[in-house]
Amino acid sequence: MAPAQLTLRRPDDWHVHLRDGAMLQAVAPATARQFGRAIVMPNLSPPITTAAEGAAYRQRILAALPDPPAGMAPFTPLITAYLTDTIDPAELARGFAEGVFTACKLYPAHATTNSAAGVSNIAAITPVLETLERIGMPLLIHGEVTDASVDIFDREAVFIEQHLLPLLQRHPGLKVVLEHITTADAVDVVRSGPANLAATITPHHLHINRNALFQGGLRPDFYCLPVAKRELHRLALCAAATSGNPKFFLGTDSAPHARSAKESACGCAGIYNAPHAMESYATVFERHGALDKLEAFASEFGPRFYGLPLNDGQITLVHEPQLIPMRLHANDAAGQGVNLVPFHAGETLPWRLA
Ligand code: NCD
Ligand code: ZN
């Protein structure tokens, strides 16, 4: 029997896309309402590559948020730098020392949304990775090969073999987070890897397998990258997330795209799960009889890996059915509207954030 309510230390989201402009204003409050901090992805257009851009983006995020309720600490965005083939390691080190950058994000060029300026040859940025290793700045990796001849469902497993394992060998002291893992292969490599290797797990990869993309027709709202895999992989992710192993922690990869950009002949990759992220995770943990493991996954393992203090304050989830709306509509300060379809649209989740 699930408890009537569940109070947890305030959690953090270790992977989120908050975007910019009208979209930032529409989505940032949903993240700040649940999480104390979030690792914010730098794949804006143009991407965040300098400390000055990072500091300015942090200000825009803070300006998009309402004041927190009385007694609640303000939300802290943790900014990341976008690695390119030509990025200057000294700029990363300066941004890290100034407290602007918390981590670096490695997108293989053309792997996903706004990754065209990403890294085309990981070995060629060895001096950058040596700097990160020396200063203790975490490297966050989108772990997919981009070779069009590799089956899309195999791209994470091939990346692990071809790129991740050699990188860990070359940089044994580098703190690495394999982001939004989707396969049993990734679970195995993280579990058996060194202590400086961890992974984030999204709510959607715990809920859906690849069938969701084709349920009764083509379903763009379930399309994201890395794409959802077979059921056996989903089950491996659920086992990892609920295991109490500190190498696996919460990262939503909430990636909003306007409804018109999703429902298109070439729909964008990304699932917008921020509005009900904690309820979504709680639903999975309850199903696996592991509600007692949720707090560590959501609020402890991430900060410990990053070497940051745990949040003060708490959130409460109430065991009460909640119907998730089919659409969300938000207007920014200028009255510009954004239409979004949230993850779990039209479903009833058993939990509600108090
Ligand atoms: C992300 C986005 O839209 O920025 N999309 C996604 O499917 N997850 C990029 C990413 O994290 O791959
Ligand atoms: Zn992402």
Image (tube, rainbow, N blue to C red):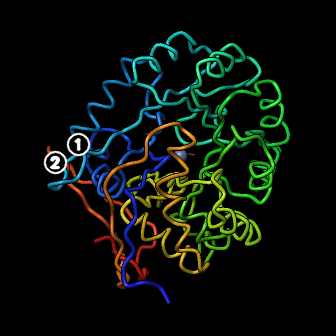
Q: Which residue is mark 1?
A: 64
Q: Is residue 318 above or below residue 76?
A: below
Q: State if disc 1 and disc 2 touch (CB < 8 Å).
A: no
Q: Residue furthest bottom?
A: 1
For the residue marked with disc 1, what is the amino acid? Ala
On the image, the x and y values in percent for residue 126 come to 72, 17
Seen in the picture, residue 125 relative to 167 is either above or below; the reply is above
Write down the quadrant of residue 222 in the picture.
bottom right
Q: Which residue position is annotated with label 2?
A: 67
Residue 8 position, x and y percent, is: 40, 64
Q: Nearer the viewer, residue 212 or 34?
A: 34
List x then y, in percent, for residue 194: 76, 40
Mark closer to the observer (2, 1): 2
> Who's the residue at 57% across and 15% down the image?
87
Number of the label disc, if any, that sits on residue 228: none
259 w.r.t. 149: above or below:
below
In this rendering, would 168 be left or right of 220?
right
Label 2's element? loop
* Secondary structure category for the residue under label 1: loop
Image quarter (top left, top right, bottom left or bottom right) of the C terminus: bottom left
Question: Disc 1 beta carbon < 8 A from ligand 1?
Answer: no
Picture quarter containing residue 52? Answer: top left
Q: CA distance from mark 2 to mark 1?
A: 10 Å
Q: Position of residue 18 (x, y in %)?
A: 38, 44
Classed neighbour count for the residue bearing mark 2: other residues with Cα under 10 Å, few (<14), some (14–19), many (≥20) = few
Amino acid type, callout 2: Asp
Q: In the rendered view, does 162 fall on the left or right side of 344? A: right
